[in-house]
Image: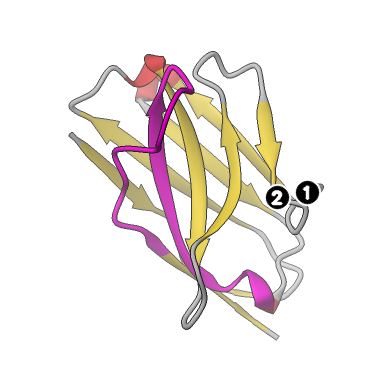
Amino acid sequence: VQLQASGGGLVQAGGSLRVSCTASGLTFGSYGMGWFRQAPGKDREFVGSISWRGDNTYYADSVKGRFTISRDNALNTVYLQMNSLKPEDTAVYHCAGRKWDIGDYDPWGQGTQVTVSS
């Protein structure tokens, strides 16, 4: 089982970036997917999630209205579209799966770095 995140990079404040997470070794369509982030010296923070059906999304207040999560089950991929980025969005972004939206998130991806310059 593997979750591979990609698409991170350096962007100026106010800019946009889309990160992706592609799954292998699991039945992707049965997993709700979450995005989390961790900045240096800080605890891991929930960013948002999408249900296994793709019909429900949830977002942390800090990103609501700026970030959008979507999924493409044909590509086994979940996306995090980030708009109006702020320096405080700088972090390593991880994806994680949760079967049937139940229980703890497992597995986890290795993360992709997003850096927002002011």
User: Residue tagged by mark 2?
Assistant: 60
- Label 2 secondary element: loop
What mark, if any, has residue 77 been given in the picture?
A: none
Residues shaded magenta: 88-112
| Figure coloring | secondary structure
Residue 16 in the image: x percent, y percent?
66, 59
- Amino acid at dot 2: Ala
Disc 1 crowd, CA 10 A, few/some/many (<14, 14-19, 20+): few
Residue 41 in the image: x percent, y percent?
48, 83
Is the C terminus in the top left, top right, bottom left or bottom right quadrant? bottom right
Q: Residue at x 77, y 62 (%)?
A: 84
Q: Nearer the viewer, mark 2 or mark 1?
A: 2
Q: For the residues labelled 2 and 1, say whether their Cβ atoms are less than 8 Å apart.
A: yes
- Label 1 secondary element: loop
Q: Is residue 70 or residue 51 the one in the foreground?
A: 51
- Where 47 falls versus 101 (above or below)? below
